[in-house]
Image: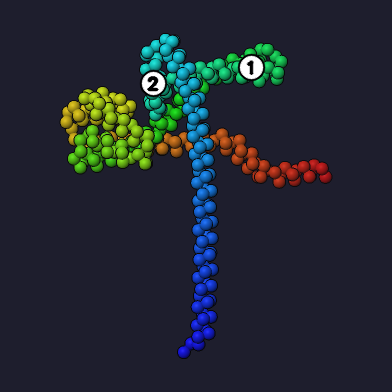
Amino acid sequence: MIPLRMMLLMSGAASLFFMAGGILMLRAVSCQRRVDARIASVRAGRVQGRKQQLAGARHVLQFVSGVGVGILRSGMLSSQAIRELTRKLATAGIRNSNAVGIFIGVKILLLIALPTFTFIVLHGLISLTFLRNTFVVGATIGGLLLPDMCLGFLRKRYQTALDRGLPDALDMMVMCAESGLSLEPTIARVGTEIQPAHPEISGELLLTSQEFQMSSDSHVVLSNLGERRVCSTLSQTLQYGTPLSDALRVLSAEMRQEALTRFEEKAARLPVLLTVPMILFILPSLFLIVGGPAVMQVLNLMKN
């Protein structure tokens, strides 16, 4: 039998062990609480700072939009020019209600601010009046054309994203059509399902689905989708009653073939594009390595 003294010692050691474990656990819990409180305070500060930044950006956008709306209301731009600008912004994926006003406001402010800033900066640096005026005129032209260049870049990137995601969307539409769905629910379903992979094409399809709900003319809705060849094919499918899945499958195959053709064209242009870098950077180094020792030997012989 275990002596009573040994049992007391064992129970005391166990008590001390559990007390130490409890103290360590309480300390860890308190440290975790302090860390959580610190993280929460930092997040709250970041959220507050982000809210302040967003509020400042919102005020700036409101000011710029106010300038653009004032220009639009003055009648300086015709209705056709406004419609054309709205279409360009839509093809770049920008469909906000005040997008036209912001674009016009940015253009006007850059047209005024950029040459003014250039004149102030160069007033004490360049003494020649003609050269300074040349830079000011260049800044004026740059302020006028810079928004259009940025819009063209955004439009090209958006259209590239649409071209990249459209074949996958057509494949999903084929599966939906073969399962028995008509065109309108097919577009709505594909627009919802493809959003994580291709948000640009998802936005276009969801917008088209909303237009289907508001309009009774399917041809007008499809013409607003932007892709003229796809829209014409789908319109012919609705008009003549041809199988939707067959038309979508043919379109998907054609677009993938076009993408493959573009990749082959880029690969075929690669040797031509590498010619100039090869001449400028590779061939001089090669000539130096190959002919350098011979040139050094000739120089040594001439010295001797």
Do we see residue 235 in this rendering?
yes
Mark 2–mark 1 Cα distance, whole angstroms, equals 33 Å
Q: Is residue 244 placed above or below 100 in the rendered structure?
A: below
Residue 283, x across and y down, in percent: 61, 39
Do we see residue 144 in this rendering?
no
Q: Is residue 247 placed above or below 19 in the rendered structure?
A: above
Query: At label 2, which amino acid type do we have?
Result: Thr
Residue 102, x across and y down, in percent: 45, 22
Label placed on residue 86: 2
User: Within 10 angstroms of label 1, few (less than 14), some, or many (20 or more) residues?
Assistant: some
| Residue at which label 1 appears | 119
Disc 2 secondary structure class = helix
Residue 221, x across and y down, in percent: 27, 26
Q: Residue furthest left?
A: 241
Left or right: residue 162 compared with residue 102: left
Residue pictured at 49% horizontal, 30% vertical = 55
Disc 1 secondary structure class = helix
Mark sitting earlier along the chain (2/1): 2
User: Residue 86, located in which quarter of the rendered image?
Assistant: top left
Tell me whether the residue at label 2 lies in contact with that at label 1, contact meaning CB atoms closer than 8 angstroms.
no
